Amino acid sequence: MNVIKTSIEGPVIIEPRVFNDARGYFFESYSKKLFDEQIAPIDFVQDNESCSTFGVIRGLHFQRPPYCQAKLVRCVRGKVLDVVVDIRKGSPTYGKHIAVELSEDNHRQLFIPHGFAHGFAVLSDVAIFQYKCDNYYHPEADGGVSLSDPSLHIDWRIDLSKAILSEKDKHHPLLKEFDSPFKFHQQ
């Protein structure tokens, strides 16, 4: 497994070692031992999967403390643009984002630690998106930042006027209106 640091401290891209032959391919999508050694000791407790069509944008979501969720995400069918925004107070990269294309072809995964808002845009006809979480979902801890916040400068690669959004995702606050419950801790 190849671990690639991003321009923001914390999130990392993971490229698995893929073995191809006449039958297709094989790769180890998760190894607790390797993950703990190369990224961070995490106990994932819940796996989620969504299926979405082209133009769907989900995000930018997080769960408030004490129910924060670190996530390991991947796209097993189709292609998405995965976006992570740093919402840790005091972080030198507060309000900055990274965008990573995850697809069934590149097999990349993205690790998102606590203190980040997360979302993705579906770039293919259909996308099946999976993620592991280190905490259970708690609806009362839901939080979000507006995915159309102009201060974030996110190019979703989709016309936002035609994007398919949930009602909840249409009403998240702008970053400047948001009081983050997360604090930056130098590592």
Image (spheres, rainbow, N blue to C red):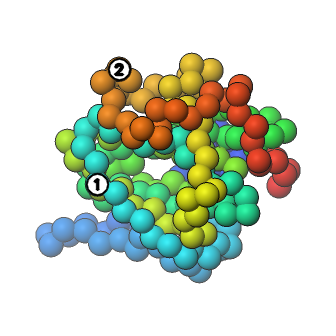
Per the image, the residue denoted by label 1 is 51
Q: What element carries label 1?
A: strand
Q: What element carries label 2?
A: helix
Q: How far apart are marks 1 and 2 (CA)?
A: 21 Å
The spot of residue 125 in percent (x, y) is: 20, 42
Vertical relation: 3 (above or below) 54? below
Q: Dot 2: within a 10 Å radius of its alpha carbon, few (fewer than 14), some, or many (20 or more) residues?
A: few
Question: If the image is split into quadrants, where does the C terminus sit?
Answer: bottom right
Q: In this view, does 94 lie to the left or right of 74?
A: right
Picture quadrant of residue 21: bottom left
The spot of residue 124 in percent (x, y) is: 24, 41
Vertical relation: 121 (above or below) 105? above
Q: Residue at x 67, y 40 (%)?
A: 86
The spot of residue 117 in percent (x, y) is: 60, 44
Per the image, the residue denoted by label 2 is 161
| Mark 1 residue type | Cys
